Each structure stands twice: as structure tokens, then as C-alpha cells.
Image (cartoon, grey):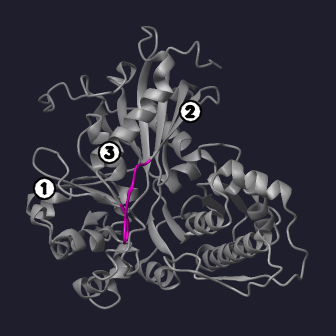
Amino acid sequence: MKTLSTASELVLGIDVGTSSVKVVVRPADGASPTRGAGPTVSSAGRAARVPVPWTRVPTGAEIDPRALADAVVAALREALGPWDRARDVRVVTVGIASFAESVALLDRTGDPVAPMVAWFDERGDAEAPGLTGVLGDGEFEAVTGLPVSGLCSAATVRALAADDRFDRVVTVLSAADWVACALGGEPSFDLTLASRTGWLDLAGRAWLPGLASWTGLRTAALPSLAGPAGSRGRVTAGLPGVPEALVGAEIVVAGMDHLVAAVAAGAGTAGTVWDSCGTAEAFLRSTPPLTPDTVRAAVGQGFTVGWHAEAPNQVVLGALRSGYAFERVLRLLGVASADDLARFEASTAPPAPGASLPRVDDPYRGSYSLRGLTSVTTPGDVWWSLVGRVAADGAALVAGMDALVGPHDRIVTGGGWAASGWFDRAKRARHPAVERCAIAEPGAEGAALLALRALRRPRPAPDPGAAPAPR
């Protein structure tokens, strides 16, 4: 297998995560599709990570979409730096995964007219109850696969509709689709990310005009839908800061980050639980498409249903704001980085079984509390209590998914917080056979893999009598 130093063709994977943009560079390598073997992505390569520069606001956070695109370009430049101007190296394709719910609102020129609101921002909460009346009582859940919640893009965007600039919105894009356009791609909306908006008819795989209108959008503002790993064109020359080696590469939107990571981890198959431990911890089960009644039941039990990056399956997803809870409590304990946490856990013994521990109430909400603190409570007591609470909540989600779609036979964990030895220990106390994904950046690796699959996918032969496609 080629190493990166000798490869002439490269594939890139971009994971636009909540905390940072991750980019991996890999040599394109794989068996010919005609032999029936799918392409692979070599493990020899390079990676880069750049923080996402959110602006903190009272309700959560927001970002200028241009600043998000700049962070992606900075990560691309760092990852490709040693090979940017090498004449014998070219990037053939770039795959993009991203967080869901947050959207870019664009005017006729393609420029943003409002901030991109973070998925965890609370400003859509007051608008969310209005979703119930658009389709009728209980129908929103069955049709969209989502609960009535401020997490839906529809509710958050409605909260922005009072801005005078809102009348200029003509296009709405997910974060990954916005990055694709910033690199020169054509506007479209990935199906896995559309599944998280509240605008999508899940079974029909079509936009719901009534919900777009309720949001305050023209129906035409929601662009065409694209299936997972859909091509959006090629990286355009002359874009500010974009590395020359990237020009001409095919742009592929791989989909929602957690789903794309599952593909890289080999956890996108039926029977496998993918436990993606990021700022949000997502528990995923791949399943054949569900009936509306089962979708309604799933949402009623606290899950969501959407389309998976492994077509043609759907995904049942349960989520906890685990990383969000961890970060705040660890900051209180003076633990500010992954290295700090590793040192803390290595130098601190977990409490003995049966020890009296404090309790963390509402750990996933904006306001949380610690109860039961005493004069002998230690930082280790607080941390062990929290990881135990979160692991128990995760086990309850897994049990609920088993009841809906059948028993699981594997649990695979990955993502940044899976590196915590204490969190891993708390999980294994409930699921002894947990497997740890060895891939450092599964979201970016999955984006690269899906982009390479798209590149190798057989294309239909052109019709010699057809008119040329417009450019």
C-alpha cells in the first residue's frame, strides 16, 4: 500500500465538529470496483485540527458561516501544507461531514445574511411548541421522525425570522453543504442532515412546504435533496486560501458526523450500536426503513429517526449531551484539556464500591447542580459520580433501542470522550463486551472513505444524443 510520501493521488476527509474542524489526508488506494472489492483508505497519512470559533451568547453560541468556512480552509492548509505545491500530487476527492441542526441562511449572491446558530443554542425553545399545530397533533413526530423541540432547525430559524435581513434569505444549507459551496460546489441539502431539520417528510424524502412556510421561509429556499455521499462538483480555482493541490477535486458531502463516523468504525450495520462520544454522545442503530407507527413510537420514547449515511437504511438515534456535561464539571474541577484529564485520571483512584458520592442533577441542561457534597468529597468523587450517571443513562438508551428494533450484538465506542479511562470503566460495568474504535478521527476518516466510494462508483454511460449538461 502506498504511503503518503509516495502517493500521487490523495483523498481528504473533513469533519466539521462542534469543537473543532478535523481534516485527514490519505492516499487513494483500493481494488478495482470491477473485481467486486470496495475502495479503502490507507492508514498512512496526515491529520490537522483547527478550533471552531463560536461566539458565545446568552442562549448558547453562534458563528458567522464565513468564519466556519475559514476554519475549514485553515485546517485544509495545515493538513496539505507539505504537499500543496508538489506537481506529482493531487487531491482527487474531498468528503465533508458535519454536525446537524445548524444551518446557513444565504442571499441571492450566496452570502450569509444571519449567524449560524449552534445546535445546542436554546433560542428555538420558545418557538418549538408551534410545530405541533402545523401537521396536526402527534403528526409532526410520525412524519419527521423528530420530537417537537427547539433542537429542530425549523424552530431555531423561526426565532431568527424577526430580523430585517430575513427577507433576503433565498437558500438554506446545512453546515456540510455550506462548506461544500464555499469550496465551489453546487448548493444541495444532504438527506442525513435534512433528517434533523424538522422540514423533511421522512418517508417521502421530500421537503414539507407547510413547515417551511411556518418557519418564515419560501419553499424554494430549501434546495434539492441529495442522498448520502452525493457529489457537488469540483473545487474551484482562485478561492481565497484554498490550497492549490485541492483545485479540481470532486466534492462529496458524506453526511451527518455521527453517522459518517459509524461507517468508518464498521458500526453502521444492523445489530451494532455505535456510541459516538463527542460534545453530544449519540447512540445509533441502523435499520431498514420503519413504518410511521414505529417512527411515532420511537420518538415517543425519546429517540429520533432519520436516514443513515449507509444507504438505504434509516437510523434510530438516542443522544445525551455527555461531553457538554463533562466539560463544564471538569472545568469546575480545574481540568481544562484532554491531557489534563489523562493526568487527573492517572493520579486519582476511583472511589471504592459503595462509597457515598455526590449527585449531579440535570447534567445536560444549561443549569445543573451538585448535591450531597461534604467536607471529605474529593474531585474524584464528583467525576466518578458524573461518569456513572452518564453511563447509566446511555445504557437505558441502548435498552430502549433494543426494544424497538431488536437486540444488539455489538457496541462500538469512539470519539474524543471515549478516551476517558473512567468513562470507559463505567460503560463496561454495564456492557462488558464494549469494543473501542481505534480510529482517532472516525468522522473525518468516514468522510474520506465515503468520498472515495463515490469516486469509484460506476457512472452511467453518457447518452450521445443528449444535450450537454449546463455548467
**3 and 2 marks in contact (CB < 8 Å):** no
Q: Name the residue under label 3.
A: 67
Give the amino acid at mark 3.
Ala
Q: Considering depth in this image, is 437 or 290 the residue closer to the camera? A: 437
Task: Please state if 84 lies on the left or on the right of 188 as rendered.
Answer: right
The question of residue 59 being in magenta is answered with yes
Tell me which segment is drawn in magenta. 52-61
Give the amino acid at mark 2.
Ala
Q: Considering depth in this image, is 448 or 85 the residue closer to the camera? A: 85
In whole angstroms, how far apart are the C-alphas of marks 1 and 2?
Answer: 36 Å
The single residue placed furthest to the front in the displayed view is 375
* Whether residue 256 can be seen here: yes
Q: Considering depth in this image, is 173 or 361 the residue closer to the camera? A: 361
The single residue placed furthest to the top in the displayed view is 87
| Quadrant of the frame with the N terminus | top right
**Disc number placed over residue 47 in the picture, else none:** 2
Give the amino acid at mark 1.
Val
